Amino acid sequence: MIGGSKTAHSIVEPTPLAKRVSGVIIVIYALITMVPLAWIFATGFKTPSDSISYPPKILFEPSLEGYVNLFTTRTRQTPEYMATLPPPTTWYDELVRSRKMVIAGPSKFGERFTNSIIIGFGSTFLSVFLGTLAAYGFSRFKVPLKDDLLFFILSTRMMPPIAVAIPIFLMYRNLGLSDTHLGMILLYTAVNISLAVWLLKGFMDEIPREYEEAAMIDGYTRLQAFRKVVLPQAMTGIASTAIFCLIFAWNEYAFALLLTSGTAQTAPPFIPTIIGEGGLDWPAVAAGATIFLIPVLVFTILLRKHLLRGITFGAVRK
């Protein structure tokens, strides 16, 4: 503007005021979403009495009793029996004896946590593997009734678990897959594969076909071109899909509650059953939830760059 005091600015670039307001909103939103996680983490270091106190205690003396109760099974004993015991040899044994109890053995949390790792990561790998192959086929080849097949695959994701829980329970009982790692891995794979196919097909469509054609002209087979050309470029989509598949398999509750009871039971149905004196042992429950969050949190952090790129992949076309 000639002779004016106003300066030109981009209609795309936000103004400084808009940036500051957006930053404040994002910080407030982040703090609000982190409050429940922080509360769960803090509850894991409270005593049972502090965890149910009213009004809730924000300042408290930290205790590891919740973690001790999570990993051990305790029994209450008479004062006479307690007097006959030798002095405690560990800090956690001393902590348990201060409650007039003794440690009877380890709890089942370690086994349930291991089951979650085996089933969660196993089904995620299988879902992504099969989903990648199916997505590549839908993206590169002329499949009869492609749109109908894709819609049918997606429709399997629309059913609530409770709608098919009873038929799956009866089928698994007849096949001997109830309460087995294989049965849960196959079930979670069947549920996740629809998500994997739809997400990965979008990524495959964005990879130019010319790359594969050039590789095959150089003497590569279709499989070699897929493995050496397509897969490296699709790693962003594969990593993003793996995160979403793992989150579902890791947190799934309904199928795990109905189809498992011991051998293959995962942590989600086990954590709410932790019983202490007079009811639920809330510090132990909070400690279990905190530990349960760690694998998914670490997995997401390791793949966070791929996740951010994967969400915006194909949003801007040249």
Image (cartoon, helix red, strand yellow):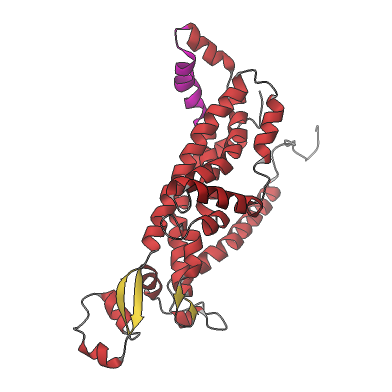
Asked whether 222 falls inside the magenta stretch, the response is yes
Asked if residue 21 is positioned above or below residue 52 in the image, the reply reads above
Asked if residue 224 is positioned above or below residue 156 in the image, the reply reads above
265 left or right of 195 in image = left
Asked if residue 42 is positioned above or below residue 183 in the image, the reply reads below
Asked whether 166 falls inside the magenta stretch, the response is no
Bounds of the magenta segment? 218-235
Residue 148 percent coordinates (x, y): 71, 29
- The prevailing secondary structure element of the residues shown in magenta is helix
Residue 305 percent coordinates (x, y): 50, 39
Question: Can residue 300 be seen?
Answer: no
Q: Which residue lies furthest to the bottom in this view?
A: 80
Name which residue lies at 44% across and 82% down.
Answer: 277
262 left or right of 165 in image = left
Name which residue lies at 62% across and 34% down.
Answer: 198
Question: Can residue 270 be seen?
Answer: yes
Asked if residue 253 is positioned above or below residue 101 in the image, the reply reads above
Name which residue lies at 44% across and 7% down.
Answer: 219
